[in-house]
Image (tube, rainbow, N blue to C red):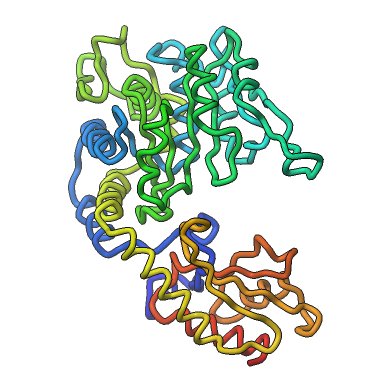
Amino acid sequence: MSNVYEALGVPTVINAVGPSTRLSGGIMRPEVAEAMAAASQHCVDIAQLQARASQVIAEYTGAEAGYVTSGAAAGLLLGTAACVTGLDPGKMNRLPDTTGMKNEVIMARSHRNFYDHAVRSVGIKLVEVGIADRFSGAGVRDAEGWEIGAAVNEHTAAVVYVSYAHTQPPLAEVIAAAHAHGVPVIVDAAGQVPPVDNLRRFISEGADLVAFSGGKAIGGPQSSGILCGRADLITSVALQHLDLDVMPALWNPPPELIDRAQLPGAPQHGIGRPCKVGKEEIVGLLTALRLFVEEDPAVRHQRWLDKMTALVQECGTLAHATAEVVADRKRVAVPTVRLTLDEESAGLSALELVRALEEGTPSIAANPTYVQEGVVVFGPMCLRSGEESAIAARLRALLGA
């Protein structure tokens, strides 16, 4: 057997989509895997480890504090819970029953997606704002900052902002509207690195909490994420996430993460307890974050570009499709190959091509986002050495060369 998955009888996949959870995430650098293996050989106090992680994350993001979560969605759940309860352990114990608490969260309607299930699971009411005419084709407008402010009332716990290149309204407008009423803003920035500057951008613009995925471009464990922001909110996050099955007389959390003097006592296990993150994930994430920040972005971009250039070159001239590299750094953070299929002459649709790639041996996963336009996209982030050749060979076989 050549790898652990074959020993288990599970086929591996050539992943040209990217670090998708459905496809088990990305390929970790050896240094990250080695750090995780080393971490597994010792026991530590998780609160102390998270306190140190908070300092490291704060250094890299410019936030007051940080926390390692079990993914960006877990960060949204924990961040929302922190905004609802503050540092009140009685409220923490009652979640997801939010009766009598600030239990509404505002979100622009165009930001809605099923990842906000993590926000709703805290027990809040999601209040939608604005009409996204620009997406429906009925017009050009979307939600505007003043609408966020107009929706705030005495029950508002937070505003959640989902960041993409096309997101409206601008984050600065949303933050200004929310902060005018003393309401915190949580930014879902799960896939918003690269560029590396985004690790600091949202905090510098005034966001109170920002959630990043650790298992995408940062290169950490798939089940890891970063939540950074205000120190008081991170304290609340820790209180609702950590294992608190400890006698009160023996509870001595690190004061840089949790200041006991601010609390009447410790809450019980919190709503975030199912979002457990292990010492291996914390150490792996911190290692990956350091490597990601230290690497020259131009070197990283060139490595990805080389893979995509090689894929196009090895495809040669396809009989029923054209393949081109899309690498304009002003438009895309990660170079890709865009294959445009002549569906009529090829005798199959772009969706059928994606299915044929998946059903072959080895299975090749391509990005199907644009199949309705006759386009299949291939990305470099999870490709191992030589897999470009395997993809090109399959495309030549399916489409003619």
Residue 255 coordinates in the image, percent (x, y): 20, 21
Image spot of residue 177 (x, y percent): 54, 19
Q: In this orientation, which residue lies closer to the viewer: 105 or 32?
A: 105
Q: Toward which corner of the image does residue 358 lie, by quadrant?
A: bottom right
Residue toward you, 341 or 288: 341
Using the image, determine if residue 24 lies above or below residue 346: above
Vertical position of residue 245 compared to residue 401: above or below: above
Q: Is residue 333 left or right of residue 112?
A: left
| Residue drawn at 38 percent across, 75 percent down | 3
Quadrant including the N terminus:
bottom left
Quick one: 133 or 11, which is closer to the camera? 133
Residue farthest bottom in this picture: 401
* In front of the other: 266 or 391: 391
Residue 108 spot, x, y in % from top left: 64, 30
* Above/below status of 151 relative to 332: above
Residue at position x 41%, y 82% in the image: 386
The residue positioned 43% from the left and 10% from the top of the image is: 90
The percent coordinates of residue 119 (x first, y second) are 55, 30
Left or right of 210? Residue 113 is right
Quadrant of residue 88 within the rendered picture: top left
Q: How many marks are shown on the rendered structure?
A: 0
Residue at (61, 83) in percent of width and height: 395
Q: Quadrant of the C terminus?
A: bottom right
